[in-house]
Amino acid sequence: MRPLERVEARDKVTGAARYAIEYPVEGAAHVVAVAATIGRGEIESVAAAEVLAMPGVLAVLSCENAPKLNSVDDAELEVFQSRTVSYRGQLVAAVVAETLETAREAAARLRIGYRAEQHDVHLRDGQSGFRADVDQGDPEAALAEAAVSIDETYTTPAEHNNPMEPHATLAEWNEDGLTVHDSNQGSTTVRDTLAKVFDLDPAKVRVISPHVGGGFGSKGTPRPTAVLAAMAAREVKRPVKLAFTRQQMFSMTGYRTPTIQRVRLGADADGRLSAIVHEVIEQNSTVREFTEKTAGPSRIMYRAPHRRMAHRLVQLDVPATSWMRGPGETPGMWGLESAMDELAVTMGIDPIELRIRNEPETSPEDGLPWSSRNLVACLREGAERFGWTGRRAGREGRTLTGMGVASATYPVNREPNTATARAEPDGRFTVRIAAADIGTGARTALTLIAAEALKADPGRVTVEIGNSDLPKASLAGGSTGTASWGTAVHNACEALLAELDAPIPPEGVEVTVDTKEELESQEKYARHAFGAHFVEVRVDIDTGEVRVPRMLGVFAAGRIINPTTARSQLIGGMTMGLGMALMEESTMDLEFGDYLNHDLAQYHVPVCADVRDLEAIWLDEKDPHLNPMGSKGIGEIGIVGAAAAVANAVHHATGVRVRDLPITPSRLL
Ligand code: MOS
């Protein structure tokens, strides 16, 4: 399709696009959250009277006075329902006041009495009991017999999502029920969850989220902001605005668990893998179970008859772990793709050639045929463009240079959706679906999909999303958005077009479709996107500083719907991969039991000066087994494997193998 700029671009750059708490509302009060200052224990008292005496303070909410809420799957949403403190930084109280300044001051002054217990926040090795999720053949025997083997441990630190817009909600009750303007990755889910929590008919809850300033997974599940704002608005009988502060986001909105990954590879003298073992230790809070499927990609990447993939969750007094871009694949491909590079170096085989020798004909996980798999084509195309052949580690003055490569992958999934397409008598079309555009360009991609199915110019199509009153939709997560919503949009538009044989009556013509049955009847294929990252590094001999002057990602992700926003998604993912490789690290304070770095001054992400020549391209991949558009997801694959490619380049340049992220100067010198 031809590239289309974001349809809401003008609204965004002129400030006309509003985000959750920017909506003007008469008489709104302000809510500020209060975080626990102990790592584990009980709340004994909340000195609410002291701050209630401050002029302008309207209410103090905590376990001492909160209304009873219904439980849902996520205990993080049981706001103020218990006196238990499960981690430092947990949401334990809130102040509602006339102004934001008063609410902040009162929240800072609110004295909470605790009975503290000893916390344990230290993720470490040493316990037994892996739960294997893949166990094929006899990997131990295969490793013992292998001509060459690798047995190394790779770690990733805790990493925090930092969308530009914090988690925020504007809540208002009236005779029709509850209306929230909320920053989330799916308004249908937030509506259904709020209805359950507050015991309301879902028809009485309205979630409005047309523009969302990033999520990366942290807004994929409804967050406590929505529940707290709704509770506070009901309490003070006024609309309220609540945004978590950047500091609070580091404990209240989820993050990626640290991982400890032992990867063992066994190969014959030609580099053909006989065994892959990937065992992962990661942490969980005591509040909410969440498994980062770190060993997941090792199930499908390379052929090896003997395999074992296992995870162990260690329950600690830490904030609740959750989704962060490419959950599972992102840390997992750090371990696997570092180990593949080590095997290549050990055997003196080119790292691309090693991967090609281990291409599986069918999915090693279940023997299913690939719907399409163009990893080798990505590696070859990238090698050609990047100048890989004959690469040589070099030295220019006090700088060492080198090149690295790593593979990328992400599964292709689809969720059931409903969409409505409508032809107006003036020749325009309106498409409605409660999809979410979290900055990805989803609205624009759906406009193109609709226009193509309607055989109309995109300028004649308006796509309405981001509102739970629209036909119900799955969330913007797991790189499923465009494929899932797009199928419903495509089918609705095609069905509408079939009905447009007569002049359109004044009331218009409307068609609604549901994709549930279509998904159930899908043929069995292993559906995954693949890619390859190429990285050049320059390492300062004296300081150990790593710079990445050049990075290329080559992807095979089916048909690309909108090249303009797709490129932006892919290089955005690669930029996060660069951050993961070199900067991002949440450091646990074992004594106080909380992450030490709570803002962007201390949690470092790449800035423009760090991002030099970064390019993403894709192959023209035609896959008939996906969806009517022929597309795979592109939201997450850009980050997957990127950190390993950087580390592999650092090894090529310096001979130093860094197995613990991020690659800071102290780890190189
Ligand atoms: Mo993404 S971590 O599935 O929002």
Image (cartoon, rainbow, N blue to C red):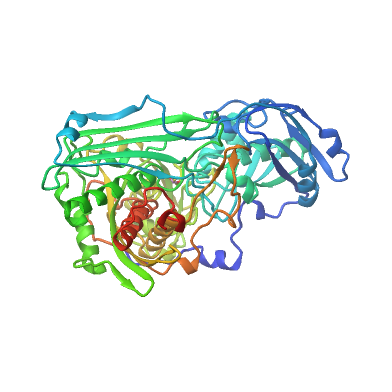
Where the C terminus falls, by quadrant? bottom left
Position of residue 287 in the picture relative to residue 54 (left or right): left
In the drawing, does residue 383 fall left or right of residue 424? Answer: left
User: Which residue in the rendered view is the most extreme toward the bottom?
Assistant: 397
With respect to residue 398, does 197 lie above or below? above
Residue 103, given in percent of the width and then of the height, sits at 77, 46
What quarter of the picture does the N terminus occupy? Answer: bottom left
Q: Is residue 254 left or right of residue 156?
A: right
Across and down, in percent, residue 201 comes to 59, 30
Would residue 443 be visible to someone looking at this image? Answer: no
Q: Is residue 375 above or below residue 141?
A: below
Could you tell me which residue is drawn at 85 percent across and 45 percent down? Answer: 56
Q: Position of residue 180 (x, y in %)?
A: 63, 44
Residue at 22% x, 48% y: name it: 343
Front residue of 188 and 412: 412
Figure quarter occupied by ligand 1 = top left
Left/right placement of residue 357 relative to residue 158 reads left
Any part of residue 490 in sight: yes
- Looking at the picture, does residue 200 appear above or below residue 348? above
Image coords of residue 11 (percent x, y): 56, 65
Taking depth in this image into account, of 581 and 430 the one nearest to the observer is 581
| Callout count | 0
